[in-house]
Image (cartoon, rainbow, N blue to C red):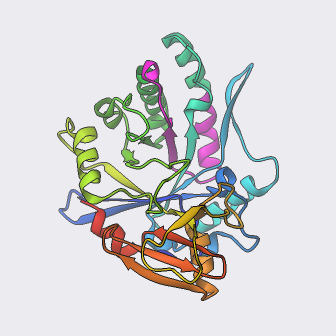
Amino acid sequence: MVWTRYDEARAFCAESGSDASGVTSTVLLCYWNSSSIMRNPPKDYDLSKLCVHCCTHIIYLGVHLDVNADGPHLVFPEDDRGLRSISDLEALKSSTPGLRLHLSLPVGDVWGAEESNSTLLLQCSPLAARLSQWLPQHSFDGVELSWDRLPMHKKMHYTRITKLMRGILRKGGFQVIVSVHPKRSNAYDIDALYGFSDYLVVHPYAQDDRPKVAVPPIIFKEDLVELCEVSLGELRNKRRVILALPLFGYTYRLRSIAHYDLRAPVRGPSTQGPYTDTRGTLAYFEICFEFTADIWVSLYDKDADCKIAVNRDKSQWIGYDNKASILNKIP
């Protein structure tokens, strides 16, 4: 896995398998435009900063679903950033052979209320029909369905929505990627969702609103293995399962700028970065921005198996994962 300094990906996902010829292949997904959900991006931030030769798929975030008299429809940001990014992605795909584009759809935005099977069918069909027109117009290859914090009483809803959308979109040759968040909910029917998807993305982490320790969001390898065994244990074939890896870190203030050893004591979360909105959180590209200023001291924490960076000028420190520590934690 390789990242550029300015990469904005919410997560990287990798899965290895063999095609019909026996050649080992890797699927690497990159979530793009998370700034529209979490923060305002830097002014010079664009797709040219993305290490695109590392990606096989780019999933575009930021689109919301809303319902009117005609059923669910796509809603882009009020300014022109959303559609401009779509145009940039089209141009990027035309110059990058083999790259696939997917549109992320947060289906929980629409189907949070109680619906019957007939209502789901009436709502899914027009949305899938609109997508069947929109996707090829913008050179997209499919969609990603996501329902974060799925309620238990909605377990079958997510499965049925996935089945209906896949059945309609497959007729147009489009892929359907499905995301699950087992750390936030145990309501996902993993086996059924896997069967109705081209790829199943497992997000084995949860962003803590008030983290007690400034460790990276990627949990330890033992916990990661246990979570995957529990959530994926019933799957006989895991070849199309993709592991999601987050790229952000929790920051804390130093108690004393003169004391910045490993696990230096802290008073609490430090102020947010220039682009993040959450106190004590930095996006991956913000961490990289800080390193370019060359005012951070980088240390390695063996206990947490991760890098720690200390910025005395800002009296803060952060735990984060780099390429080596991520590879150490992947089962």
Does residue 49 sit above or below 258 in this rendering? above
Q: What x and y, as percent, mark residue 195?
A: 31, 34
Give the quarter of the image for residue 159.
Answer: top left
Using the image as rendered, state which of residue 53 and residue 97 is in the foreground.
53
Does residue 169 sit above or below 118 in this rendering? below
Q: Can residue 93 be seen in this view?
A: no
Q: From the viewer's perspective, is 308 left or right of 62?
A: left
Q: What x and y, as percent, mark residue 283?
A: 58, 64
Q: What x and y, as percent, mark residue 69?
A: 75, 19
Q: Does the magenta stretch include residue 133?
A: yes
In percent of the image, x 28 and y 51: which residue is there?
223
Give the quarter of the image for residue 133.
Answer: top right
- The number of discs equals 0
In the picture, the quarter occupied by the C terminus is: bottom left
Q: Does the magenta stretch include residue 250?
A: no
Using the image as rendered, state which of residue 87 and residue 108 is in the foreground.
108
Q: Is residue 99 visible?
A: yes
Q: From the viewer's perspective, is 243 left or right of 141?
A: left
Where are the magenta residues, as a range?
Answer: 127-154
Using the image as rendered, state which of residue 267 and residue 316 is in the foreground.
267
Q: What x and y, as percent, mark residue 312?
A: 61, 82
